[in-house]
Amino acid sequence: MGIIMEMNLSEEERYIQARKKVENIKGFYGNLVAFILVNAILIFINLYTSPSYLWFFWPLLWWGVGVIFHGLKVFEVFPGMGKEWEERKIKEFMEKEKQNKNKWQ
């Protein structure tokens, strides 16, 4: 019975992780669509009102950098800072806390 419950829990955990990953991807695509639409509007406004000074470049540049980093994180381009790294760090901090508590007992 314990193995079956462990298998179900494992299956549930995998489902939760997959669902979270899908939500992160949806969030990235939402960010990307907003980036494209808003910057298209800004470009139009800039070129229509003051074509001699191209100020649209600045929000395009900095928001673009944010979108790129968001995409790199969501699609785990640098796996060294991914979920496994987070889990290792959490375990490391928990172990240090446990050792610190035992030190004073």
Image: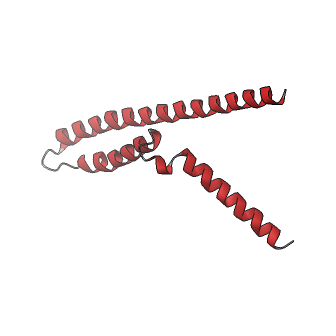
Quadrant of image for the N terminus: top right
**Residue appearing at x 36%, y 44% in the figure:** 68
**Residue appearing at x 80%, y 67% in the figure:** 101
**With 24 as the anchor, is 42 left or right in this view?**
left
**Residue appearing at x 21%, y 42% in the figure:** 46
Quadrant of image for the C terminus: bottom right
Q: Residue furthest right?
A: 105
Name which quarter of the figure residue 19 lies in.
top right
* Render colour scheme: secondary structure
Q: Nearer the viewer, residue 17 or 105?
A: 105
Residue 40, given in percent of the width and then of the height, sits at 27, 35
Q: Looking at the image, is 84 positioned above or below residue 18?
A: below
**With 18 as the anchor, is 68 left or right in this view?**
left
Residue 60, given in percent of the width and then of the height, sits at 29, 45
The total of numbered circles placed on residues is 0
**Residue appearing at x 56%, y 45% in the figure:** 83
Q: Nearer the viewer, residue 44 or 94?
A: 94
Q: Residue furthest bottom?
A: 104
**With 100 as the anchor, is 75 left or right in this view?**
left
Residue 73, given in percent of the width and then of the height, sits at 45, 44
Name which quarter of the figure residue 44 lies in.
top left
Q: Nearer the viewer, residue 29 or 51?
A: 29
Residue 2, given in percent of the width and then of the height, sits at 83, 30
**With 96 as the anchor, is 3 left or right in this view?**
right
